[in-house]
Amino acid sequence: MTNRTTGRREQIAGGYVHEVEPGVKNWVAVLDFKSMYPSIMISNNICSTTLIRDSTTESSHFISPITNTRYLSKDVRIGLVPLLLQDLMDSRDKYKKAYSQALENGDEDEAFLNDQLQYAVKILMNSFYGVFASSFYRFTHEKLGASITEWARYNITEIISNLEKDGYDVVYSDTDSIFVCTMSEDNTPAKKPDSGSELLAWESAKEETIKLGEQLASQFTKEGAELEFETALSAFFSHGAKKRYVGRVIWPREELLIRGYEVRRTDSFGILSTTMTEMFELILEGDEEGAIDLAKSVITEVQQGKIPPSDLIVSRSCKGTWDKRYGKWVFDKIYANPDSLPYVRAAKERISRGLQFTPGMKVGYIITNSKSSPMEVKAWLVDEIGGEPPKPDPQYYVNRLAKSLGRITSALNFDESKLKDYAKNPSTQKSLFDF
């Protein structure tokens, strides 16, 4: 029943990711598969206790769509893992129902508790796939993990195909989510107007998106592939890369959704995160020229040294161990070449100045010379001991900004190289929209 292996094996194919075209799409419904992998394991009885290991084939068997891996019918035996997952699924549904009830009653504490409980159960349920698919677990088996992702890819591609046959524009899909245009009128504004007929048109488009999202979720749900209408977006943008997109969420809450971009990366810095977020806001509002102008302006100001060093701090978590024998912090037990890592050198600088260091803490630093190897950095200690801030290397930050912001503006025909050229000589450059 167990399958312990020491050798390497071929990696299991992951979830399906749909190609995404660069640009903006307005009025998008996001459909999400409810507990995708656990649902597949339950509905297809996937478990090491139900895996058929000989060559027999019966019509009652569950057969995976690509490798034809076979599992016993539930009438013969329900697998141990599907049984456990069904119990967990029922528990999660209970917590989600209690969460909704608490919201209706205005009990925020109770709602928070049940939301955290359902999320904890969700994480536990999803871990079962890892047990089957990862080679270092005792109950791993490549056929089990592969079967799960096979059914997942089959389910999502079948639904996408049917949506497109019905005339819907599927703008993106990632593992367990499908983004579908709702065919609202192109002239309906994505940004919520303040009043008048435009506001009425916006509200109508919102209702149409919600209605269609709920309809599609119900229409394409089947056993083992239950779709839920997750969110409504008034606008969706990607520069054309998988797993990188943003959206203006208008239901069930209002927020800016950002996935995959440097806004959330640990090695980002203040001016990059804020500029990128502001650019996304402008693009989703239809102001592409404003987004390009903002990128050019910020990069030029960095080139000219006009941005405060405090907006250029890079923060990374740093680990270390206390050496009792020598009474000091050491890093070579964790990192193979610690002195090549800027955050380790910044941590050492903190320690040398008598400042506190805690393993795992975020250490802030400024890149002062990117041409040297390894590049030179100075720890950011101004907030703790005062003094003059480190002098940043402008070219490093220009290059970082141009690369990150250029990914976005490339979808607007103004790429990384054009941003760098503009920063060198802004007075002679023209915007795409100046021609």
Image: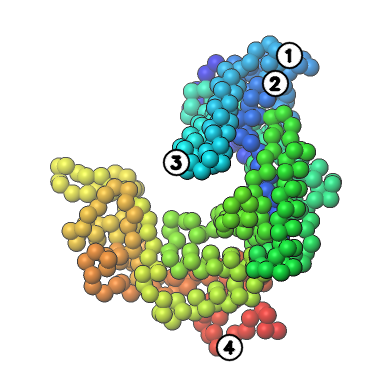
Q: Tag on residue 428?
A: 4
Q: Upstream in the sequence, badge 3 or badge 4?
A: 3
Q: What residue type is labelled 2?
A: Arg
Q: Nearer the viewer, mark 4 or mark 1?
A: 4
Can you say whether 290 is above or below 148 in the image?
below
Q: Do the residues labelled 1 and 2 touch (CB within 8 Å)?
A: yes
* Residue identifier under label 3: 109
- Residue 223's place in the image compared with 408, above or below, is above
Mark 1 and mark 2 lie on one chain; the one further toward the N terminus is 1
At label 4, the amino acid type is: Thr
Quote the CA–CA distance across marks 4 and 1: 75 Å
Q: Distance between the residues labelled 4 and 2?
A: 67 Å
Q: Are marks 3 and 4 in contact (CB under 8 Å)?
A: no
At horizontal 74% and vertical 48% (from top left) the residue drawn is 211
Q: Which of marks 4 and 1 is nearer the N terminus?
A: 1
Q: Which of marks 2 and 3 is in front?
A: 3
Residue 135 visible to the viewer: no
Point out residue 368 in the picture as x, y percentages from the top left corner.
Answer: 35, 71
Circle nearer the N terminus (3, 1)? 1
The quadrant of the image that shows the N terminus is: top right
**Numbered badge on residue 56:** 1
Crowdedness near tag 4: few (<14), some (14–19) or many (≥20) residues, C-alpha within 10 Å = few
Query: What is the spatial separation of the Cα atoms under label 1 and label 2, in whole angstroms?
Result: 9 Å
Q: Residue 70, labelled with which disc? A: 2
Closer mark to the observer between disc 3 and disc 4? 3
* Mark 4 or 2, nearer chain start: 2
Q: Where is residue 318 in the image (x, y as percent from the top left)?
A: 33, 51
First in residue order: circle 2 vs circle 3: 2
Above or below, 417 relative to 225? below
Q: Which residue is at a point 58% across and 77% down the rendered structure image? A: 293
Mark pair 2, 3: CA separation = 46 Å
